[in-house]
């Protein structure tokens, strides 16, 4: 163990790792090798067996690390256009490595005397960007699922009290669009509440008249709705729920408005696209993932409250070994604001990146990805053999290959699934799929600054080639 902590050995290993990662960035940027080196899951599990009882030394450890990189999904490759996970900004990744070595827990201030102030600065910046006032606040957490749960627990406490419904005399409810991320329904389940999906309109946004009908119905059935969770934006299509009329409904009924801005809250940084989240400053709470459009290493989620003490009032517990005073007295201890205890220092990579590049760089990146999505959508529409599900509201594009004469139905859906599998196995692109009202669609999320319209044209050609190879197989 003393050898493992040798500083010169660490220095040499660090140089080797950074050189290898720089080569990885060069290769992926040059479109060398596959995006996803596909392996059968059973074979992959077999490849990575349990560690040995006797180690092979530093060289063995570094060789294992290099092997792991090669076997991974290469998000820095321009052909990665899949899930809402970006290629990590290299500087942020370096900051993340520093955070790992320093390893200050973000539970209380004295365990992270530099990390807590930096997180406080990041939270204040996020709140200001959303248009929240001087009494706002929040905390960073590990991902949108925990973030949304944290916000909705605070909503229940604020509207009905944390013990409401325990006796079974009162049913509690949370409403969200039928296109909302599944973690909203899961949060309601964890809280012992009812999740009520609200119908979406033709553009996959929450339908406000349907929302009003659901609120009236639930009132007649004596369900106490305490929160509405708006999607900003949703995962299937990137559509934004209309915040202003939803906020009006919340004010009229005395409900908490939560905006799940995991993906889309970043557009507040863009003057060109900020209108998509008009009304977000009226929300009582917002979740905002920096590990999406701000290209931070996973995970960095802001849980942001218009009234900053809302979270502290929710998680008001004492523990003599950690929290022995009230949250008001210990305002500097993040553990008062979250269900998590030991937390990774998530703020430093974002803070360092903002200090290095400025907010404007990220705003320009957002504008670029939206423009690229719209250019790609135009190519799809003009193709003749592809169709678009809807005009992309942001940087998610849903499309499918439709041969001449093929109508909607199971055969068309099965074709998209087969084509996606062939594209993945080719290694040229990583795309995902989503099921919409008219069937199964291929889905791209454009977060990678290395992806060009040329790459996306090649993606269409790759799908066509996959369709042609399937036709050839059937012909044989």
Image: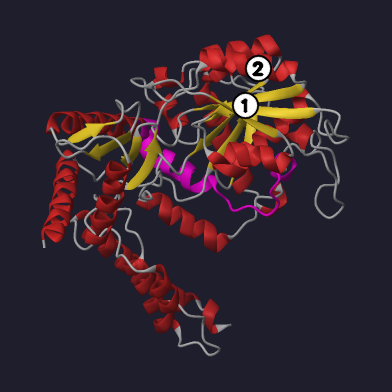
* Disc 1 secondary structure class: strand
Residue drawn 53% across the image and 80% down it: 4
The image shows residue 255 at horizontal and vertical percentages of 69, 19
At which x and y percent is residue 287?
Answer: 56, 34
User: Which residue is labeled 2 in the image?
Assistant: 215
Percent x, y for residue 51? Answer: 51, 82
Cα separation between marks 1 and 2: 9 Å
Residue occupying the point 15% across, 60% down: 473
Using residue 162 as the reference point, say whether residue 403 is left or right of it.
left
Residue hosting label 1: 175
Residue lying at the far bottom of the rendered structure: 54
Pointer 1 local density, CA inside 10 Å: few below 14, some 14–19, many at least 20: many
- Asked whether residue 11 appears in the rendered view, the answer is no
183 drawn magenta: no
Secondary structure under the numbered disc 2 in the rendered image: helix
Which of the 4 quarters of the picture holds residue 174?
A: top right
Q: Is residue 69 left or right of residue 290?
A: left
Q: Residue at 81%, 47% (x, y): give it.
A: 323
| Picture coordinates of residue 394, whole percent (x, y) | 35, 29
Q: What stretch is highlighted in magenta?
A: 334-362
**Label pair 1/2, CB-CB below 8 angstroms:** yes
User: Quick check: can you spot residue 371?
Assistant: yes
Q: In which quarter of the image is the N terminus?
A: bottom right
Dot label at residue 349? none
């Amino acid at each position: 163990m003393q050898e493992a902590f040798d500083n010169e050995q660490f220095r040499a290993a660090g140089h080797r790792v950074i050189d290898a990662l720089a080569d990885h960035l060069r290769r992926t940027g040059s479109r060398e090798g596959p995006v996803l080196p596909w392996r059968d899951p059973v074979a992959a599990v077999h490849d990575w067996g349990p560690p040995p009882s006797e180690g092979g030394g530093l060289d063995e450890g570094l060789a294992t690390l290099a092997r792991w990189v090669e076997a991974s999904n290469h998000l820095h490759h321009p052909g990665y256009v899949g899930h809402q996970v970006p290629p990590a900004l290299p500087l942020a990744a370096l900051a993340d490595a520093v955070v790992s070595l320093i390893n200050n827990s973000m539970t209380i201030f004295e365990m992270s005397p530099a990390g807590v102030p930096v997180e406080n600065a990041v939270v204040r910046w996020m709140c200001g960007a959303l248009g929240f006032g001087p009494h706002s606040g929040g905390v960073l957490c590990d991902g949108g699922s925990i973030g949304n749960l944290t916000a909705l627990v605070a909503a229940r406490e604020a509207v009905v009290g944390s013990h409401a419904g325990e006796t079974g005399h009162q049913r509690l409810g949370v409403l969200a669009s039928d296109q909302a991320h599944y973690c909203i329904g899961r949060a309601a389940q964890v809280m012992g509440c009812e999740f009520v999906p609200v119908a979406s309109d033709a553009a996959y946004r929450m339908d406000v008249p349907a929302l009003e009908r659901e609120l009236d119905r639930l009132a007649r059935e004596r369900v106490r709705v305490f929160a509405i969770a708006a999607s900003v934006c949703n995962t299937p299509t990137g559509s934004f729920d209309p915040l202003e009329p939803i906020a009006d409904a919340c004010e009229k009924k005395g409900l908490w408005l939560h905006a799940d801005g995991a993906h889309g809250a970043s557009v507040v940084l863009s003057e060109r696209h900020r209108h998509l989240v008009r009304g977000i400053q009226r929300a009582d709470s917002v979740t905002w993932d920096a590990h999406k459009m701000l290209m931070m290493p996973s995970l960095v989620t802001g849980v942001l409250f218009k009234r900053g003490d809302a979270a502290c009032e929710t998680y008001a517990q004492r523990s003599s070994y950690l929290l022995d005073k009230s949250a008001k007295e210990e305002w500097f201890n993040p553990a008062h604001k979250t269900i998590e205890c030991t937390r990774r220092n998530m703020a430093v990579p974002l803070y360092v990146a903002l200090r290095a590049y400025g907010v404007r760089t990220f705003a320009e990146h957002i504008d670029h990805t939206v423009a690229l999505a719209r250019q790609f959508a135009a190519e799809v529409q003009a193709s003749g053999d592809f169709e678009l599900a809807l005009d992309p509201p942001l940087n998610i594009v849903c499309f499918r290959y439709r041969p001449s004469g093929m109508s909607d139905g199971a055969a068309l859906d099965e074709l998209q699934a087969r084509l996606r599998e062939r594209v993945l196995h080719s290694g040229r692109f990583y795309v995902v799929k989503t099921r919409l009202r008219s069937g199964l669609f291929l889905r791209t999320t454009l977060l990678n600054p290395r992806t060009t319209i040329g790459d996306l044209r090649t993606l269409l050609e790759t799908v066509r080639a996959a369709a042609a190879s399937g036709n050839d197989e059937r012909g044989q």
